[in-house]
Amino acid sequence: MSNFEAFFDYIQEISGKLLSEDDKQLLMAHFKPKKLRKRQYFLQEGDVCKYIGFIVKGSARTFTVDDKGHEHILKLSLENWWLADFESFYLLTPSRFNIEALENLEVLQSTNAQIEEYLKQIPAFSAMANVISQNYTIANQKRMQAAMSYTAEERYEDLISNYPHFLQRFPQNMIASYLGLSPETLSRIRKNSFK
Amino acid sequence: MSNFEAFFDYIQEISGKLLSEDDKQLLMAHFKPKKLRKRQYFLQEGDVCKYIGFIVKGSARTFTVDDKGHEHILKLSLENWWLADFESFYLLTPSRFNIEALENLEVLQSTNAQIEEYLKQIPAFSAMANVISQNYTIANQKRMQAAMSYTAEERYEDLISNYPHFLQRFPQNMIASYLGLSPETLSRIRKNSFK
DNA sequence: GGCGTTTATTGACTTGAATCATGAAGTACC
DNA sequence: GGTACTTCATGATTCAAGTCAATAAACGCC
């Protein structure tokens, strides 16, 4: 299963630990490959996020729809990222988010109960979880700060320097929504920064 | 040490596990009580956040200062909350944040290296860390969504229903900054919501 | 290759919130 | 108990970004 090779590499790299053959067998036993076509939903608002997915290939967006029907993208995700509404996944409550494939998407998915097992039984997996949790906390802190202290233009520059590949992979209107801007405003910002 | 009782209770409650006498001794050995007077800094921008603090009594704010000299409050903290710039604390890099006591403050503080030890040696402590990490992830997700999708007024209502005690404990201009608003705007929002 | 859909640009106008300015309450402190 | 500092309220004005509208470019697809 070539799908799993990238996944194993990822776990070993992030955790700094090696997976045994048994570990790998265990992971393959309960992480199920799942394919979604572009525009299909990994999660729909109101549903419980039963699965967490590891993206092997493709991209996705996590967004909400507000009262006025406007969409707000909270997260853009690419290969080697995890896909879930963590609130719903941890607490098994209905989600307020939608997760939609922006390109044809291949994930390896598993349930919360199964993840708990992995955390207990696979040291590399548990170490990985700790590192990811740290990284998330840091990234969230940064993003919140950017949202509060930066102007629209600064947030865009920030994105360019931190995630330059986003510009290749995601259409501009998605980037705009992710930055909390209207597509028109982002278009104007880009125009001005060429001068 | 009466300081530690509240701390032990907190750990046991959050983790759902009991602390042994040995555990408690170990915690008391390396969590140091520290007092700060109102206006004193727990952390200053540019310094490495060497300590994480558990608030026993008092309150604090975590904020940045932007190019124009404006302050932006990212976090308001009360009793039984943890105090740190996690990015700086985990990575030992200089912090972009300031943490200042808003009232006289009593914390129990410890270093990153020591926390690692606790995580290994005290099951309740490690369980607590996992729960907190989940809670943080969920809270961050919510806050980010609120920042992106809600109007100023909705964010204020949200704050009232989620953290009503904030209004008693923090002056209005701090609340405004935490919500990403000017004090004037918050004052006007409050005026309108009385009608 | 051409038609339809999606995405991006540009302009005119509107609006929500910031800024600037002033005065009124509170609160602290000697 | 009065002076100084801080906090809060209110009005007038400015500004950044959103909205609405129309066109242009890019992409998918039969």
Image (cartoon, coloured by chain):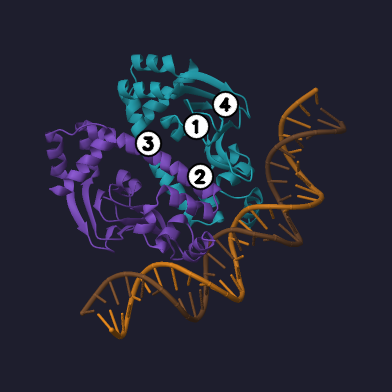
Chain colours: A purple, B cyan, C orange, D brown
- Label 4: how many Cα within 10 Å (few below 14, some 14–19, many 20+): many
Image location of residue A163, percent across then percent down: 40, 50
- Label 1: how many Cα within 10 Å (few below 14, some 14–19, many 20+): some
Tell whether A41 sits left or right of B194: left
User: Are discs 1 and 2 both within one chain?
Assistant: no
User: Are discs 4 and 2 both within one chain?
Assistant: no
Residue type beneath disc 3 = Gln
Q: Chain of mark 1?
A: B
Residue under label 3, please give it: A134
User: Are discs 4 and 1 both within one chain?
Assistant: yes
Residue at the (44%, 52%) spot, across then down: A160
Q: Nearer the viewer, mark 3 or mark 4?
A: 3
User: From mark 1 to mark 2, how far is it between C-alphas?
Assistant: 16 Å
Residue at the (55%, 47%) spot, across then down: A149
Image location of residue C21, percent across then percent down: 78, 52
Q: Nearer the viewer, mark 4 or mark 2?
A: 2
Tell whether B40 sits left or right of B87: right
- Which image quadrant: the C terminus of chain A? bottom right
Residue under label 4, please give it: B105
User: From mark 4 to mark 2, how far is it between C-alphas?
Assistant: 24 Å
Residue type beneath disc 2 = Gln
Residue under label 1, please give it: B94
User: From mark 4 to mark 1, how far is it between C-alphas?
Assistant: 23 Å
Camera-nearest residue between A42 and A59: A59
User: From mark 2 to mark 3, how far is it between C-alphas?
Assistant: 17 Å
Residue at the (51%, 34%) spot, across then down: B95
Q: Nearer the viewer, mark 1 or mark 2?
A: 1
Q: Are the residues at dot 4 and dot 1 in contact (C-beta closer than 8 Å)?
A: no
Residue type beneath disc 4 = Leu
Residue under label 2, please give it: A145
User: From mark 3 to mark 4, how far is it between C-alphas?
Assistant: 26 Å
Q: Secondary structure at mark 3?
A: helix
